[in-house]
Every structure is written in C-alpha cells, then in structure tokens.
Image (cartoon, helix red, strand yellow):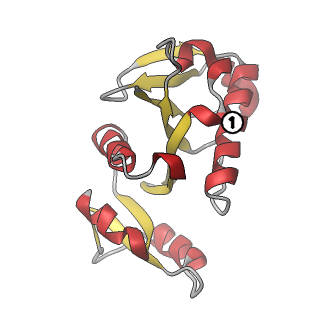
Amino acid sequence: MHSYYMFKASKSDFSSLSSVPLPVRASDSIQGEYYQTTLSEQQQLWSVIKLFYRQHLPYSKPMFKDTVILCCQEKADDKPIANHTNQLQIDNILAAVRIKKIGEVQLVTGLVVKKSARSQGIAHQLMSVIQSNLLESECYVFAIASLTDFYQQHGFIKPHEVDNNINQLFKKHNNQNRPLALLKSS
C-alpha cells in the first residue's frame, strides 16, 4: 500500500517547529490526518528526507522551508508511518517531490522515484496529488529534456511570459551539460 505524506515547515524559525502539525497523511488528498511531532522527530524525519535525496538525486538540495511530498510503502502491519515517525526509514520512501515558494509563484522541483519503484505510475500519482491540493498560484518546473512530455501530460506548457524571479533562477540552473526546459502550469 502506498501512502503520501506532506512535510511542511512553519514560517517561523526551526526552533519553534514543535507545534507544527507534521506530517499529513493523504491517500487521495492532502486533507488527511494531522500528526503532532516533537522537534526531535521532525529533525529525524528531515534527516531521512535529505538522505533519500542524496542517494537518488544528489544534485537536488532540499531546504527545510520547502514543502516535500513523499510516496511511501507502508509497513506490513498496515499502521500509518506517521503514527510512528521512527518507522519512516529510507527504505520506505519510494518517491519524493518538492515545492518551493519563489516570491509569489511556486516551483515544482526534485521529483524523484527510486529505481526499484519506477514504471509503476508513482510519479504520475505524485503530480496528481500536488496539482489538486498544493499548487495554489502560478507554478513552474525546470524539466530535463527526457521529462518534458511527462510534465506536459500534467498540464505544463512552454510559457509566453515568465515570472522574473523564476527566469533568473532558471538562467542560473540551465547549462549545456544538463539543459532544462522551462514549463509553466496552464
């Protein structure tokens, strides 16, 4: 069974996160159950997320202020991982995607599915979850060439106009060794 969890930091500093409801469990939508976690548990969860990215997408550097959606394989006992935050292990995570707030717009970044879980539609499921629940303003993606069609299937198109902050960030990340396509949600 796959479950989706959202990890989102508060707007305040790291030391005051103990009252933030993390994570959210959502099988069909992000309107799932809220779980209170301690600061120590939040630090453990964030460490697991960072390790997952280091192992599967090393050039992607998740920031604590990013919203991260995880697709996890639940344990055999069928208890939600979020009820037992110490159960969230690197092996449970099948995929992740990050949403960054850039000024007034959003950037979908760091979409990764671990190799053993590919070709199961997990990336499409993640995109459906974030599109219906989290994309609240203009949204962009910097797609590698092989994934342009994937993002176009989810309503992203080549934009006629681009937010200035996104344009500057795109210029910074786009290079000849790894060319990117700038796409915007329609």
Task: In the rendered view, tell whether residue 47 sits above or below residue 177.
Answer: above
Q: Quadrant of the N terminus?
A: top left
Residue at 73% of width from left, 37% of height from top? 47
Q: Which of 14 and 180 is in front in this view?
A: 180
If the image is split into quadrants, where does the C terminus sit?
A: bottom left
Name the amino acid, label 1: Val
Image location of residue 91, percent across then percent down: 62, 35
Residue at left offset 68%, top offset 26%: 42
**Horizontal arrangement in the rendering, residue 157 relative to residue 84 (left or right):** left
In the rendering, at what x and y percent does residue 31 appear? 35, 23
Q: Where is residue 129 in the image (x, y as percent from the top left)?
A: 33, 39
Residue 43 position, x and y percent, is 73, 29
Position of 155 with respect to 86 (left or right) is left
Residue occupying image coordinates x 66% and y 55%: 61
Describe residue 183's horizontal placement relative to residue 71 as left or right: left
Above or below for 179 versus 102: below
Please identify the quarter of the rendering in which residue 148 is found. Answer: bottom left
Q: How crowded is mark 1: few (under 14 residues within 10 Å), some or many (20 or more)?
A: some
Q: In this view, does 153 lie above or below 163?
A: above
The residue at the point 38 percent across, 52 percent down is: 119
- Where is mark 1, residue-wise? 48
Residue nearest the viewer, comparing 167 with 33 = 33
Camera sees residue 3: yes
Which residue is nearer to you in this view: 146 or 14? 146
